[in-house]
Image (cartoon, grey):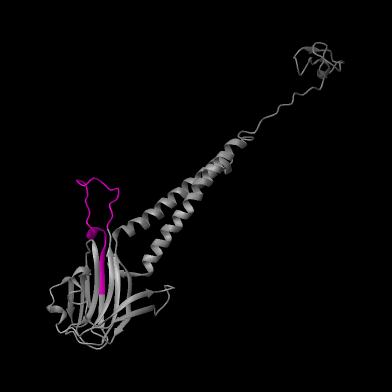
């Protein structure tokens, strides 16, 4: 009696033709009885080396640009933070200046405002005062009332040019951590000024009184002297003073560099990850 396996019809695994049960090869196509077709499946996304290379180059380019921009923005924000004097002013304070003459003078404050490519005048026509403001503080170490004044150079020689004073020629801080800066004076011998500074009609900005005095000045184009005296014009001026500058644009520039750098860095990292790293 034949089993069910012996009665079962056999077909070629390759061409599908019926084969004799005892045959080792298909008579139609010659394929072996145990033929199994091998299929190769190509991994999706593999072998795309060119695309990955482009992604790495483009992403690296964005990252390369982002790093110095981030560094510049961080450095600017860091410096303004270290020398922050409040109210948007950046500078130094509580530096000791002294002279045995009547006046301390800081000459040749050159305020230059060059033309530049800006929005049309009907949209915005800034003055220097819109872009920068200067603050000078002084407090007497001897208890005398203080006078601070700013005068145009052209108005100084007739009144102050022949007087005795000490001029600050160098103010240097080699390290922002220095407590005592390097200050150099130049003595100008001359006559005694016989009138109090508050009686002179030459100042473009002035302030005087007891205790700490603060002069806030919005400059115009020109060359100026900064003058610090005792209010009564007496000799031996000894003050702790400071100078700071307010430039609103610095804050915007610093933040803009940081934000722009972060955006470029994010774009660069995304291009590299999506184009060359992320598995597919």
Asked whether residue 280 appears in the rendered view, the answer is no
Where are the magenta residues, as a range?
A: 113-136
Magenta stretch: helix, strand or loop mostly: loop
| Residue 93 in which image quadrant | bottom left
For the residue pair 89 and 262, the one nearer the viewer reads as: 89
Measuring 34% from the left and 80% from the top, which residue is drawn there?
Answer: 185
Task: Answer with left or right where residue 202 lies relative to residue 81.
Answer: left
- In the rendered image, residue 185 lying in the magenta stretch gets the answer no
| Residue 275 in which image quadrant | top right
Task: Answer with left or right where residue 259 lies relative to residue 217.
Answer: right
Judge whether 109 appears above or below 120 on screen. Answer: below
| Residue 87 in which image quadrant | bottom left
Measuring 24% from the left and 68% from the top, which residue is drawn there?
Answer: 224
Image quarter (top left, top right, bottom left or bottom right) of the N terminus: top right
x, y (%) of residue 200? 13, 76
- In the rendered image, residue 114 lying in the magenta stretch gets the answer yes
x, y (%) of residue 137? 26, 75
For the residue pair 220 and 141, the one nearer the viewer reads as: 220
x, y (%) of residue 194? 15, 84
Task: Answer with left or right where residue 90 lies relative to residue 74.
Answer: left
Measuring 16% from the left and 79% from the top, which residue is drawn there?
Answer: 197
Image quarter (top left, top right, bottom left or bottom right) of the C terminus: top right
For the residue pair 41 and 79, the one nearer the viewer reads as: 79
Q: Looking at the image, how many numbered discs can be counted on the residues?
A: 0
Asked whether residue 83 appears in the rendered view, the answer is yes
């Amino acid at each position: 009696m034949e089993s069910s396996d012996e009665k079962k019809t056999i077909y070629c695994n390759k061409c599908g033709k019926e084969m004799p049960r005892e045959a080792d090869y298909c008579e139609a196509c010659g394929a072996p009885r145990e033929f199994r077709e091998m299929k190769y499946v190509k991994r999706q996304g593999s072998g795309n080396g060119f695309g990955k290379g482009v992604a790495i180059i483009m992403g690296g380019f964005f990252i390369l640009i982002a790093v110095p921009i981030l560094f510049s923005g961080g450095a600017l924000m860091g410096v303004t933070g270290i020398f922050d004097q409040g109210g948007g002013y950046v500078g130094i304070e509580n530096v000791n200046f002294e002279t045995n003459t009547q006046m301390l003078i800081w000459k040749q404050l050159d305020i230059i405002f060059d033309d530049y490519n800006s929005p049309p005048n009907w949209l915005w026509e800034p003055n220097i005062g819109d872009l920068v403001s200067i603050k000078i503080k002084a407090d007497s170490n001897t208890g005398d009332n203080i006078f601070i004044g700013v005068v145009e150079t052209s108005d100084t020689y007739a009144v102050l040019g022949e007087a005795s004073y000490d001029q600050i020629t160098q103010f240097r801080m080699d390290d922002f951590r220095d407590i005592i800066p390097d200050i150099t004076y130049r003595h100008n011998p001359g006559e005694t000024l016989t009138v109090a500074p508050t009686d002179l009609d030459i100042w473009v900005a002035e302030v005087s009184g007891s205790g700490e005095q603060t002069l806030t000045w919005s400059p115009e184009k020109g060359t100026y002297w900064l003058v610090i005296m005792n209010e009564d014009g007496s000799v031996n001026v000894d003050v702790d003073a400071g100078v700071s500058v307010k430039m609103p644009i610095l804050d915007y520039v610093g933040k803009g560099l940081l934000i722009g750098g972060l955006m470029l860095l994010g774009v660069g990292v995304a291009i590299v990850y999506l184009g060359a790293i992320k598995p597919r």
